[in-house]
């Protein structure tokens, strides 16, 4: 049993609140235990310059953490004049993950802008952002189809993210902050609903780990993604 009473292969309680914001085409508040992220999907009738000569669309993401989202207040990155390397890396990860399940030609010459704002952080903010952002993006696509803007569904699959790690020699799924900060191995896993890997980020925080540990963590992650996919589909079904 873990500090919060979970078994090693359990996800934290997941809650997805739809239409959390009024104005974006799709928005959710996703809670993964005590981690909470607002994910919004806005449709822009334009594409980046490098795509303007073609017919394809684009999906991109921004990520940020509110000053009061962490144990000790953090400064706004806008006040510093630039985003941190961590922020840039995470928003690129979110964008890559969402683009992996989007047919850009079917999306047409428009951009879906994803905004992920962490309002409370307790580990796993990047994976929670991916999981919630997919639901927000899919809701925006549903709205475009309903309006007749899109003739075909451009979504190829679902996508979700989850963390896994080794803490005190024990393999665990979905690490909270106290586990993540003491992990021997920390891993972020992004997969499609059909079981294909989009990205795997694995780090030995202390000692190197072997293939057996890697395989075990990937298996844990895959089981977690299956559960998250069910929750994503349930949230979207209630939208229709």
Image (tube, helix red, strand yellow):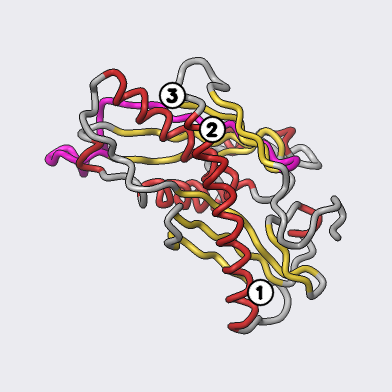
Residue 160: % across, % down: 51, 49
159 lies left or right of 109: right
What mark, if any, has residue 235 been given in the picture? Answer: 2
The residue tagged with tag 2: helix, strand or loop? helix
Please tell me which of labels 3 and 1 falls first in the chain. Answer: 1
Q: Nearer the viewer, mark 2 or mark 1?
A: 2
Q: CA distance from mark 3 to mark 1?
A: 43 Å
Q: Residues within 10 Å of mark 3 (few under 14, many from 20)?
A: few
What mark, if any, has residue 142 been given in the picture? Answer: none
Residue 83: % across, % down: 53, 43
Q: CA distance from mark 3 to mark 2?
A: 10 Å
Reading the image, the residue beneath label 1 is 204
Query: Which corner quadrant of the image does residue 179 belong to?
Result: bottom right
Please tell me which of labels 3 and 2 falls first in the chain. Answer: 2
Residue 181 versus residue 217 in the image, above or below: above
Q: CA distance from mark 2 to mark 1?
A: 35 Å
Reading the image, the residue beneath label 3 is 240
Q: Which residues are magenta?
A: 33-57
The residue tagged with tag 1: helix, strand or loop? strand
Q: Residue at x 43, y 24 (%)?
A: 240
Q: Residue at x 61, y 64 (%)?
A: 187
């Amino acid at each position: 049993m873990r500090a919060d009473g979970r078994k090693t292969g359990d996800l934290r309680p997941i809650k997805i609140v739809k239409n959390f914001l009024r104005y974006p085409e799709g928005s959710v508040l996703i809670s993964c235990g005590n981690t909470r992220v607002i994910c919004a999907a806005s449709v822009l009738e334009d594409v980046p310059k490098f795509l303007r000569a073609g017919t394809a669309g684009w999906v991109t993401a921004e990520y940020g953490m509110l000053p009061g989202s962490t144990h000790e207040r953090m400064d706004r990155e806008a006040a510093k004049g630039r985003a941190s390397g961590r922020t840039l890396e995470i928003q690129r990860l979110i964008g890559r993950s969402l683009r992996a399940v989007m047919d850009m030609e079917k999306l047409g010459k428009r951009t879906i802008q994803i905004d992920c704002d962490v309002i409370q952080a307790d580990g796993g903010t990047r994976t929670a952002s991916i999981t919630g952002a997919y639901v927000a993006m899919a809701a925006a696509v549903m709205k475009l189809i309903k309006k007749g803007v899109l003739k075909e569904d451009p979504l190829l699959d679902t996508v979700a993210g989850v963390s896994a790690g080794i803490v005190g020699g024990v393999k665990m799924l979905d690490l909270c902050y106290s586990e993540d900060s003491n992990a021997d191995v920390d891993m972020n896993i992004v997969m499609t609903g059909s079981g294909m890997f989009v990205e795997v980020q694995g780090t030995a925080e202390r000692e190197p780990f072997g293939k057996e540990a890697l395989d075990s963590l990937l298996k844990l992650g895959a089981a977690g993604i299956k559960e998250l996919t069910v929750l994503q589909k349930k949230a979207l079904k209630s939208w229709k």
